[in-house]
Amino acid sequence: MMGRQRIAVIGGVASGTAAAAEARRLDPDAQIVLFEQYAEISYGACEIPLFLAGTVKDPNQLIAFTPERFEEERGVSVQALTRVDRLDAQSGMLEFTSSVDGETRKAKFDKFILATGARAVSPDLPGVNAENVFTVRDLQDAISLETYISDTVIQHAVVVGGGFVGIEVAESLTHRGIRVTMLQPTPGPLHVHLENDMALLVAELLEKGGVTVRDERMARLEASSDSRVNAVRTVSGEMVGCQLVILAMGIIPNVELGVEAGVKIGDTGAFRVNDRMRTNLANVWACGDCVEVERVIDGRSVISPLSLTAFKTGRVAGRNAARRGAHKPARFEGVVAAQGVKVFDGEVAYLGLTKSVAQESGFSAATVTIRHRTKGALVPESRFIHVTLVFETFRGRILGAQLVGGPGTVLRANTLIPLIRKGATVSDLYEQDLIYAPPFSPRLDPLLVAARKAIRSLEGRRTT
Amino acid sequence: MMGRQRIAVIGGVASGTAAAAEARRLDPDAQIVLFEQYAEISYGACEIPLFLAGTVKDPNQLIAFTPERFEEERGVSVQALTRVDRLDAQSGMLEFTSSVDGETRKAKFDKFILATGARAVSPDLPGVNAENVFTVRDLQDAISLETYISDTVIQHAVVVGGGFVGIEVAESLTHRGIRVTMLQPTPGPLHVHLENDMALLVAELLEKGGVTVRDERMARLEASSDSRVNAVRTVSGEMVGCQLVILAMGIIPNVELGVEAGVKIGDTGAFRVNDRMRTNLANVWACGDCVEVERVIDGRSVISPLSLTAFKTGRVAGRNAARRGAHKPARFEGVVAAQGVKVFDGEVAYLGLTKSVAQESGFSAATVTIRHRTKGALVPESRFIHVTLVFETFRGRILGAQLVGGPGTVLRANTLIPLIRKGATVSDLYEQDLIYAPPFSPRLDPLLVAARKAIRSLEGRRTT
């Protein structure tokens, strides 16, 4: 293939724009078209809680590039408000429909990058389409919800789901003066990512902030005559009255377009790609929330629906799609899967594997948990922090960690990422000369205290 | 050597108490005596700024263990207010004088641990012993200074020295309503640890907090008739009037006792020890601020006058001194030499080598500096942060880093420690999936932005 290559990027948020920009950087001559079904591209989905909470008033502040600016500064043609209907990778034909004029058109491309993202899970229940039931995924969702909050008197909202989106929305609504009840199936939220005791600490942080946390599942949405939901009925039969329901029950990758074109998906339901972000089709790459990536600790394929993963996989896909002979291929290095979430005046971080996931992956895993302080004990701003280390019981390799505490908890968790990525042990962690000064840490950083406890627990195992 | 062993620990602050406690843990039968020339042992020297600033009112809050409690809970006999005069390692004889009764006594020991620490540099100038000239090293210094501040009207103080002690004292005095001028020999403080541009940022933080930073050396102390210093004359001839002078000009290890006993010192002037903290004498170990330790990046011996180093080397020395056949020796793993200091509402961290130190150590070294934000741009608490990476120009190995910025700067620096310790490159750093959420970080953490800039600078070097 010589001459001017044509590259279609399908999906225009984090990974799609990263892919298009990187492809342009590599090949100044290529014709690159970015397709996006909504009006906005390149916005910061992670900043939606700031908008819902009222900290950021104008949703346009979340937008990094308008389509016009992206075209101008990145030299990528943007087809916003355009839905891609069909992809034929072999012939290179793309079929798409503009929601502006309703017309369906076709165009030929040499290469395709699928950045189709994911959508919020919406259960198959009567009432999910009521005007006061929302999911929070896209900027459009957020604008609709914010408008509804601003225009309606809402005393009480139910957030269904205790993942990080549920937590962020619960806090944002609270800041808007709305009383919030969170329904989620376990005693504490974030139960996929946290050991039970740590999840309970998160529930405490939420309760301290004013959110009622219930370990209940939603069974039904009870709608009044005016097409609004006025209560959530739980599996145990309780009715929780409300004027607003937020469904934060997880995400499903958008793979339909790719699957119809013959792109394979993995066990997670997302596209399978190699470490160059190429799918099973020779001229189709994929990136962002619609792909599986390697979790470096156990080599398993996981969905890592994080902005940084989207950005990095997008750049890898863009580079590899656009590159010609002279350019070395880019590789995506996999994820430790580290995440942080603010919970009122507390912070939660989790990375790597929980004990149960580690055991499923075949590790003989144990945990230790310590409670310590974020700063020197005499510093007025010092707060409590809890650290759980998950480690394998033979050599003490660190498999995961969970931290719940005051300000500084999430940045502290970052220190573990290079260690986990390299297969370091709890003894390796204990060797690190982490910075000590009372404004920043107790003399032994909480991470070191946790490492020491893990080392002693391993010694105990060996001698008994 | 069988039977009950006798271990003398000389020096009772951080490393001495750590050594004594660890020796006791290993050998419940040993007779362990801790000698300390002052009344207090086991206090938090790093918390002195909190006491000087008035945040902590009672200096006893800085004391972790009184001699009585240490005797009781750790089972170590404490000889406070006792100065060790002479050590004869071969015969095992120790000679010491009590400042309570003035008596000199002798006792025999099998093993010795030198934890004699360091003292503040005091220049050989008339006036250094005036009643309003202080160094800030021991708890006793701090109490004297605090009493003087409380009892005297002080408008203006001069702090001589721009190391981290000088900075901490300058901030503390400012919080007490005292105007402070800092004299130090370079345009910005911390010049031993920072590149010039970063040092200037620290000067800005100090100036913003109200401290006047002057690149001037002290030439003389001008004393009035009443034995107080009333001005500092600089090398350029200027008179800086003041009612208080703090000398924060560095430290000298206390090695005299050991040297007389035949313990060898290295080029730094501190005791030479192996990685088991043993000196050249078979029954003498040493730890804390009076020893040299290995800087892992270049293998050089350095003094690492940090609390964590004191604690860890103390434990290693205590364990190895007390251990018998059944116990494995402990090893000290060396230092990256990471340090953090609060400067009013800013933070400074530095670790590893500066460019000039790296070049002295034979590396072909380069730097990049980036300016970014501590949190997402839309978060109201987001502040600026500057990151300098020092790296070698062949493979891109990270040799050091310096960070100056708002809250979160120091904890962020910790992430680099495991990487530097393992010889990681700027590309390795860029691979780390550091946590992103707007309350904690911009989408690309400042460390990753710095890594990317370093990678591009290396690519530029290769192609040109």
Image (spheres, coloured by chain):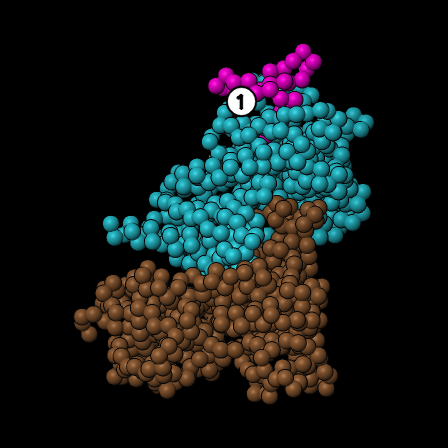
Chain colours: A brown, B cyan
Question: How many neighbours does mark 1 have within 10 angstroms: few (below 14), some (14-19), or many (20 or more)?
Answer: some
What residue did someone put label 1 on?
Answer: B218
Q: Residue B139, how many percent across, how many down?
A: 70, 35
Magenta region: B222-251
Residue drawn at x 64%, y 33% is B174
Residue B259 visible within the image = no
Quadrant in which the N terminus of chain A is drawn:
bottom left
The answer to if B235 sits in the magenta stretch is: yes
The residue type indicated by label 1 comes to Met
Residue at the left extreme? A3
Helix or strand or loop: what does disc 1 sit on?
strand
In the picture shown, does residue A365 fall above or below A431?
below
Residue A381 visible within the image = yes
In the picture shown, does residue B111 fall above or below A344?
above
Q: Residue B439, how many percent across, how many down?
A: 56, 58
Residue drawn at x 56%, y 62% is A50
Q: Quadrant of residue A101?
A: bottom left
Residue drawn at x 48%, y 39% is B201
Quadrant in which the C terminus of chain A is drawn:
bottom right
The answer to if B24 sits in the magenta stretch is: no
Relative to A337, is A35 on the left or the right? Answer: left
Q: Nearer the viewer, residue A265 or B201?
A: B201
In the picture shown, does residue A451 fall above or below B262?
below
Relative to A441, is B371 on the left or the right? Answer: left
Q: Nearer the viewer, residue B206 or B52?
A: B206
For mark 1, name the chain: B
